[in-house]
Image (tube, rainbow, N blue to C red):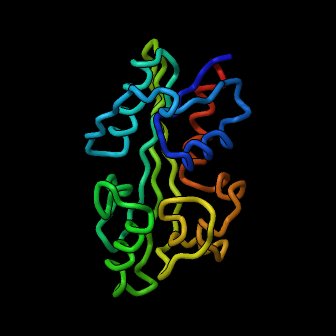
Amino acid sequence: MNTLVIATKNAGKLSEFKQMLGELPYRILSLTDFPYIEIHEDGKSFDENALIKAKTVATHTGFVALGDDSGLEVEALGGRPGIYTARYAGEDASDKDNIKKLLSEMKDVPWERRQARFVCSLALVFPEGRIFIEHGFCEGIIATKPRGKHGFGYDPIFYLPGYDKTMAELPDQEKNKISHRAMAAQKIKMHLIGT
């Protein structure tokens, strides 16, 4: 069986990928299986960061590697937090810290101007050098307060009008059909199926 290494230590993200790619003939590992690998994420875009992660992991392990860089772009904030989504409130910020900062910045923004989208760039790197980059998007609105217990990150404040729920109020199986990561993963699957 082939091995696919997801370039993340984030348990929530790994769990999502296992659900989305689990039926493929790949053993799925993550950076927790390779604690010695250090990734210096210094790209200027989601694509660059995803590629840095995947190339680093493929080089160090000799396995197919999947790098994910995703984040939240809020229209009223000029696209912020963008590539700084995970560390928006500081380098060691928790999900709650990041949400608190974002809600504080959005406190005077009216409902009709709270549009946002989740963006995902996935880079797939094969040890022999083939590279594929795919994208996924999920449109929504920044809620005024957190709701829901599922997911991670900004899911509790990412409201989906079509569902009348936040991302965190959706069961994982539902979220993994419509999320930005799910959209990109569907495209990445096509590159993995033929190998």
The x, y position of residue 43, in whole percent, is: 27, 40
Closest to the observer: 141 or 17?
17
Vertical position of residue 78 compared to residue 16: above or below = below
Vertical position of residue 91 compared to residue 114: above or below = above
Residue furthest top as drawn:
128
State the count of labels.
0
In the drawing, does residue 176 fall left or right of residue 105? right
The x, y position of residue 125, in whole percent, is: 46, 24
Closest to the observer: 118 or 34?
34
The quarter in which the C terminus is drawn is top right
Which residue is depicted at the point 65% across and 52% down? 176
Which residue is depicted at the point 39% across and 77% down? 103
Corner quadrant of residue 88: bottom left
In the drawing, does residue 51 fall left or right of residue 3? left
Which residue is depicted at the point 48% across and 64% down? 154
Corner quadrant of residue 26: top right
In the drawing, does residue 44 fall left or right of residue 52? left
In the drawing, does residue 144 fall left or right of residue 51? right
The x, y position of residue 112, in whole percent, is: 45, 83
Vertical position of residue 34 compared to residue 127: above or below = below
The x, y position of residue 130, in whole percent, is: 46, 19
The quarter in which the N terminus is drawn is top right
Residue furthest front as drawn:
35
Vertical position of residue 51 compared to residue 178: above or below = above
Which residue is depicted at the point 37% across and 57% down? 85
